[in-house]
Image (cartoon, rainbow, N blue to C red):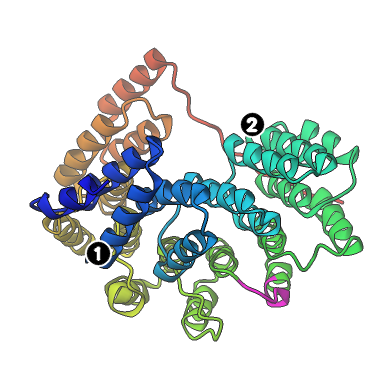
């Protein structure tokens, strides 16, 4: 029983990866007391816990008689602000269900932004476990709607929804379809249904609603929805900031981001929020503001910039003609031990295209194609770069390569509402 204690003390570096693996092993073997004890030791050390730490201990807590353990873990998850994945949140749902706390289980589900088939199955099991077979049917229909939307089968999704009594989850999923499809008319009808049945107080529904209006060009309506949300989450703030950025209102996005930091509800920006506000700065030419945000992210908000943030700032600098600064930023990123992703190389290729930086552009294009050899969008971007420097032989070679691989340039299009 005390092997885990010796293991913890004997590991020379006691890295979190090794300890997470041991946690998972104890949990799989049904050694739940050992799981809890090792988790307690990890927490008391200096480690920053992650989703792989919480998932096995939540499974262990589900089997322990004392429900306080699970609630303490949930509180710690909230306190540390750990970026939890769908698997961890599903384990949290299952734990509350086994505790007999169906309401808590459903609440966790409703707060999830991403749900997979395992999540839906866990919710169905919760209702069956607690003797609510009729709710099971509602959940199955909701999961069917979600599946249709995920696979871009919007007509089937709306057909299923029309045959059932509206609920917040179904309406939220349908609104996501309207958002993806820029279907303002149906989105407005769903908005009316949400008002009629009293679902407009649902924060997650409002988050998707404001996103739908923004993607349909109704930015003022989006702001009205945002202002009406009583309990704004980080998703609420990020969605509105992103909406302003997409419409070229960088100043408004920046202003809202600063308001978020001063918000009395203690909602702090996350890495996605930082991407949204940096993108807004890029689309509005706010170079200095974007640099200041990037440089202060760690000190002010505890956010360590990752590759997506670097690619955003590289794009900002490239659009502003500051190609040397863009490459200096890239070299700083590499020195900090952050490996470049396709997004970073793509930002560099685009910056070189805009600034006719030939040699370094070819260097970036080579690495980008090596990382994404079968991506049609990447081939188009690289072709655009070579066209800008009059290397039409390379452009033709890339087009020939695309045809051989069965890749095709996706044609752009626009909707015009004449009603």
> Mark 1–mark 2 contact, CB under 8 Å?
no
User: What is the span of residues highlighted in magenta in the rendered image?
Assistant: 226-232
Residue 224: % across, % down: 73, 74
Identity of the residue drawn at 29% across and 73% down: 298
**Real-space CA distance between mark 1 and mark 2, rounded to the nearest whole angstrom:** 41 Å
Question: Which circle's residue, 1 or 2, is located before the other in the chain?
Answer: 2
Residue 252: % across, % down: 54, 77
**Is residue 413 left or right of 141 when viewed as pictured?**
left
Residue 74: % across, % down: 49, 62
Can you say whether 163 is above or below 336 in the image? above
Can you say whether 58 is above or below 146 in the image? below
Q: Mark 1 = which residue?
A: 322
Where residue 337 sits, quadrant-wise, is bottom left
Bin the neighbour count of mark 2 within 10 Å (Cα to Cα): few under 14, some 14-19, many 20 and up.
few
Question: Which of the two residues, 302 or 175, is positioned nearer the viewer here?
Answer: 302
Do we see residue 122 in this rendering? yes
The numbered disc on residue 45 is: none
Identity of the residue drawn at 24% across and 64% down: 322
**Is residue 270 left or right of 102 when viewed as pictured?**
left
**Is residue 21 left or right of 71 when viewed as pictured?**
left
Q: Mark 2 = which residue?
A: 151
Most distant residue in the front direction: 1
Identity of the residue drawn at 12% across and 50% down: 11
The kind of secondary structure element at disc 1 is loop
The kind of secondary structure element at disc 2 is loop
**Is residue 215 left or right of 22 when viewed as pictured?**
right
Question: Which of the two residues, 281 or 362, is positioned nearer the viewer here?
Answer: 281
Question: Which of the two residues, 346 or 415, is positioned nearer the viewer here?
Answer: 346
């Amino acid at each position: 029983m005390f092997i885990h204690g010796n293991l913890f003390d004997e590991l020379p570096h006691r890295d979190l990866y090794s300890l997470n693996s041991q946690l998972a092993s104890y949990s799989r073997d049904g050694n739940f007391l050992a799981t809890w004890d090792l988790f307690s030791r990890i927490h008391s050390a200096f480690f920053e816990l992650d989703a792989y730490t919480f998932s096995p201990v939540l499974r262990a807590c589900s089997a322990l008689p004392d429900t306080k353990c699970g609630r303490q873990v949930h509180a710690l998850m909230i306190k540390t602000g750990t970026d939890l994945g769908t698997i961890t949140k599903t384990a949290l749902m299952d734990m509350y269900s086994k505790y007999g706390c169906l309401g808590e289980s459903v609440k966790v589900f409703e707060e999830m932004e991403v749900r997979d088939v395992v999540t839906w199955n866990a919710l169905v099991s919760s209702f069956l476990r607690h003797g609510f077979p009729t709710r099971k049917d509602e959940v199955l229909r909701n999961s069917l709607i979600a599946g249709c939307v995920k696979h871009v089968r919007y007509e089937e999704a709306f057909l299923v929804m029309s045959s059932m009594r509206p609920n917040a989850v179904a309406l939220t999923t349908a609104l996501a379809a309207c958002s993806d499809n820029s279907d303002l008319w149906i989105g407005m009808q769903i908005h009316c249904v949400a008002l009629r049945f009293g679902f407009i107080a649902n924060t997650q529904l409002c988050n998707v609603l404001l996103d739908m209006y923004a993607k349909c060009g109704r930015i003022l309506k989006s702001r009205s929805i945002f202002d009406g949300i009583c309990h704004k989450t980080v998703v609420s703030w990020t969605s509105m900031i992103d909406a302003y950025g997409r419409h070229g209102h960088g100043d408004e996005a920046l202003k809202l981001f600063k308001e978020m930091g001063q918000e009395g509800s203690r909602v702090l920006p996350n890495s996605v929020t930082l991407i949204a506000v940096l993108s807004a700065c890029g689309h509005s030419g706010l170079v200095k503001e974007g640099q200041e945000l990037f440089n202060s992210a760690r000190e002010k908000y505890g956010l360590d910039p990752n590759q997506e943030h670097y690619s955003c700032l590289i794009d900002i600098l490239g659009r502003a003609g500051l190609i040397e600064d863009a490459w200096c930023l890239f070299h700083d990123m590499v020195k900090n031990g952050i490996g470049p992703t396709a997004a970073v190389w793509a930002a560099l290729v685009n910056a070189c295209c805009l600034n006719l930086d030939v040699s370094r552009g070819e260097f970036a294009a080579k690495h980008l194609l090596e990382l994404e050899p079968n991506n049609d969008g990447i081939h188009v971007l690289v072709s655009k770069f070579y066209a800008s420097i009059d290397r039409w032989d390379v452009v033709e070679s890339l087009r020939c390569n695309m045809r051989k691989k069965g890749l095709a340039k996706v044609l752009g299009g626009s909707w015009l509402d004449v009603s």
